[in-house]
Amino acid sequence: MPLRDGARVLTDPALRPAARRWRRVTEEAFGIDLVPVTDGPADVVLALASDLPDGGYRIEVRANPAAPGTVHVEAADLAGAHAATQTLRQLAGPAAFRRAPADYRGPSGGTPAPMLPVVRIEDHPRFAWRGVLLDVARHFLPKHDVLRFVDLAAAHRLNVLQLHLTDDQGWRVQIDRYPELTRTGAWRRESTVGTWRTGSRDGRPHGGFYTQDDLREIVAYARDRGITVVPEIDVPGHVEAAVAAYPELGTRKDRSGVRTTWGISQDVLDPSEGSLAFFRHVLDEVLDVFDAPWIGLGGDEVPPTLWRESPQIVERARALGLFGPDGAVDVSRLHGWFVARLAEHVSAAGRRAVVWDEAVSPMLPHDVIVTSWRGYAQGAAALAAGHDVVMAPEQAVYLDHRAGDHPAEPIPVGFLRTIEDVYAFDPLPAELVEAQPAGGRTGRLLGAQAQVWTEHLDSARRVDYATYPRLAAFAEVAWSPRGDREPGSAASKEFLDRLERNHLPRLDAYGVEYRPLAGPHPWQTRPGVQGYPRDLAAETAVGGWAGLGGWREDGGVENLPERSPVDDPAPERDT
Ligand code: ACM
């Protein structure tokens, strides 16, 4: 069915943002006008339907071009309309992903009209939270690249972007009350190149931050595409950049600069009333900039080593009544205590906190959402404890981990996670559900999230390479009904076939520098830069469903027998 120049588009007012987006991309890509109308006959109709599940839609492209309503879309809600219009865009072929027609034939010839196949589609998402995390702290990504990342995520019908805004290596959000956070904390002297184990540095300053107006723009841009931006301010670990700006926040009070290496830092916050007040103020500004119902507080990888060495902090834990099962004061509980206090602050503002799984403790308010990253078991336990959960296990959906075992894989870190592995991701394996005590699972599995950490992704081009096409596999898993998608299964083969035939051409048309299925292009390699591959089978044999990631008293990953000794006992994320 050709979509004619001047086609009339009639939209229910509730669905207008989705219709507007679709009109704009289609007009640009094909050089035609699509005319919004409020009544009368129309070529394209977008209507609300009450018989569809949340986020669901129905599309019918009819064969008779003379009849009004040639393209008929029904959506349960605005989210469904966003998904439907992304499908309409896909139906128009790869050319719909260009910014201008590639086949323009001059003023008299114009361009061929977009063709839509005659189809009937009805669909709805499996999960309400189909997320992707983008780490803009380890490497700053300029605003226009963040907007592009959002646009691409939306094209894959993802609906949450967790923006990891703060970490040891950089603070990326302007906070008016504390200007040093960006004046000092947004910049570092140099960066580690590859794994920190080689000690290799680039000697080149790196940094950047988003103004509050930049972030409001990103939020609005994402909203316009059906994506909620969840800001993450990571506490009480991953704070060296903040401590560099305001040393009184730190346990040592003497940090001199923003961290230049990767890995888990011992320099965590002093969990004092002063630190709490500081971060409440930070969150007040974050709550003002971001309209998401959810606010990330981090809470991952918090070594209590320096807390143990500080008599004042031990005394504080005692005064707060933080004792272990043996009755002795347990400073490590300050971690859960601190996050719980800030979660209450977020709750008081009418939002819900989101934390990484290490922050779960009996002190954590029940409304807090838990993101399970070290493994699956932590998510299952959080569900049993009554928390809503997002599954993001590093064993499956960390897209900074190596996508192949090609000899030229650039900076190969983490587990080998091919596109087929990501496609086989099951957010909550049946074995874990069965292992739960009867009646114990009271939280809701909200969905799943893929992570794009950027220690080794220093540009939008590197982000493209790590993210695509694996994010397409993840997006399909997060959207579609559960199924057998094991590598080699019929579904997996069919997915790869569709990917190659239909989807990679769309990514090509958009201009995504994805990882080719056969391995990197020569210009995508990083000769001489060392990664740190991890062995999933070996770690799973020891750690099981809980994994071995994160900071652990027993050294975790580093204690696996086949590892050679390293100069720092802390495992690092790039590991
Ligand atoms: C994490 O990977 N530390 C959440």
Image (cartoon, rainbow, N blue to C red):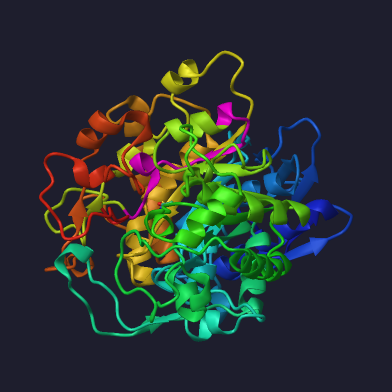
Between 533 and 542, the residue placed more toward the observer is 542
Q: How many marks?
A: 0
Q: Residue 135, located in which quarter of the rendered image? A: bottom left
Is 455 drawn above or below residue 120 in the view shown?
A: below
Between 510 and 542, the residue placed more toward the observer is 542
Q: On the rendered structure, is 422 left or right of 147?
A: left
Q: Residue at x 33, y 71 (%)?
A: 458
Range of the magenta residues?
A: 383-400
Q: Residue 174, located in which quarter of the rendered image? A: bottom right
Residue 486: where, in percent of width, then height?
33, 28
Which residue sits furthest right? 39
Residue 25: where, in percent of width, then height?
60, 65
Q: Is residue 377 visible?
A: yes
Q: On the rendered structure, is 496 left or right of 12?
A: left
Residue 204: where, in percent of width, then height?
28, 85
Q: Is residue 406 magenta?
A: no
Q: Is residue 389 magenta?
A: yes
Is 399 drawn above or below residue 123 in the view shown?
A: below
Q: On the rendered structure, is 492 left or right of 373?
A: left
Between 377 and 112, the residue placed more toward the observer is 377
Is 119 drawn above or below residue 313 in the view shown?
A: above
Residue 214: where, in percent of width, then height?
61, 77
Q: Is residue 43 visible?
A: no
Q: On the rendered structure, is 292 left or right of 251?
A: right
